[in-house]
Amino acid sequence: MNKESVVVCGSGIVGLACALGLARGGHDVALIGPRQALSPPVADVYCPRVYAISAASQQFLAGLGVWSMLDAGRLMPVEAMEIYGDAHGRVNLQAWQAAQTTLAWIVESSELERVLQQAVQVYGIRWHDDKFRELQAGAVLGESGQRFAADLLIGADGAKSPVRAAAGISLDSKPYHAVGLVVHLNAELSHQQTALQWFNAEGVLALLPMPDTAEGHQVSMVWSMPQRLAQELQKLAEPERHAALEARLQAASGNRLGRLRVRSALLGFPLFLEQSDMIAPGVALAGDAAHRVHPLAGQGLNLGLADVQTLLRVLAEKEAYRQVGDMRVLQRYRRARAEPVLAMRLATDGLQRLFAAQSAPVAWMRNAGMQCVDRLPFVKRLLIGGASGQ
């Protein structure tokens, strides 16, 4: 009996993980997407985009055989998290409070892509350096004109997904009118493997622990800043931009890590809250193609990897007489993802709305609520479990 063919569109982390998982599960897989040539890692030079990988995602990547391929010297385990409100509110989370050794791992995007690319090549997965152009009956047409048979097409092709558009899958999109600014920083004081986060009038600031460099301690900044303020910073010439950003950082962080100095280029990306219908006949979406949430919890990639893990499980458990693109099978995938994705949407969007409100009574209540949470061990265990994806 011939294997059913599955085509994965998208060669980012989610697409590569999906193709690898399908191949390991015995499916006939073709991967369509640009081959990104990754330069060898350089000491003290780090990819500008990093991810906080949850315990659940780490276990999934380990199951794919790629976690052990990462350079341990470029990984940073997060053992604690400090969250500050815009007044007296504060919550401290420690891994040991939930009987864990680590809350998350900070990993460079380029290093995850590198090991996934290597694994895809080892498994001999057909990787076509092409782009999706058109969806035909039982086939996918690439921009090169090449035709790929597809019993199931998986769109892991990003937030502007051409697969989603071609399949006519609906998308509910709401702009936050904010920009996520990312940059690596030298820190005067050690982060002690602690992630730091502040909610204030200038958005949500996160400082993620990174490996030390020859210049000293290092953290990665992710600042979800109102669009107007972000654009003002981005328009400045580099010396003025660095000085202005460092001054804002000192004020926002309360000197928690001492002096912070910019050590890499400042990048920015617009923020959206998006949710698609996720499936169509013979088509399933995963990752940013399926949904996007506010980055304040750092869960975007974890949601995408959980999409892949769930889809692999649903396909493995389907009845033998059903095809991989059967709508009943795909509906099971959508149902299985509905609750966790909705919960993350409500949590991140709710927190963003709560701290965006400027009235004095709301400000008092949210900071008082943080103080209350900080005194309740069982609530902390729930928060840590949620962040770990467990």
Image (tube, rainbow, N blue to C red):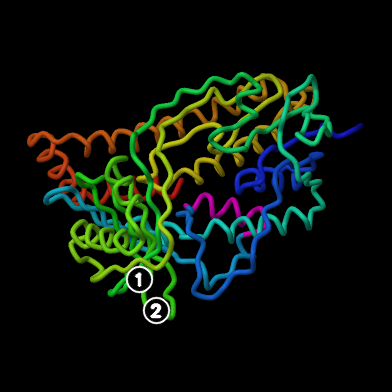
Name the outermost residue toward the left: 360
Q: Camera-side residue: 242 or 378?
A: 242
Q: Check whether the beta carbons of the residues at disc 1 and disc 2 lie within 8 A of each other.
A: yes
Q: Secondary structure at mark 2?
A: loop
Name the outermost residue toward the right: 1
Q: Secondary structure at mark 1?
A: strand
Q: Is residue 58 magenta?
A: yes
Q: Amino acid at mark 2?
A: Glu
The magenta segment: 54-66
Q: Please tell me how crowded label 2 is: few (under 14), some (14-19), or many (20+) other residues with Cα within 10 Å.
A: few
Q: Please tell me how crowded label 1 is: few (under 14), some (14-19), or many (20+) other residues with Cα within 10 Å.
A: many
Q: Position of residue 11 (x, y in %)?
A: 66, 46
Q: Is residue 170 magenta?
A: no
**Quadrant position of residue 5:** top right
| Residue at the disc numbered 1 | 186
Q: Amino acid at mark 1?
A: Asn
Q: Is residue 141 left or right of residue 183?
A: right
Q: Is residue 160 left or right of residue 185?
A: right
**Quadrant position of residue 157:** top right
Q: Residue at x 65, y 47 (%)?
A: 17
Mark 1 and mark 2: Cα distance apart in space? 7 Å
Q: Position of residue 50 (x, y in %)?
A: 48, 57
| Residue at the disc numbered 2 | 215
Q: Position of residue 351 (x, y in %)?
A: 28, 38
Q: Residue at x 47, y 52 (%)?
A: 54
Relative to 368, does residue 67 appear above or below in the rendering?
A: below
- Magenta part, dominant SS: helix
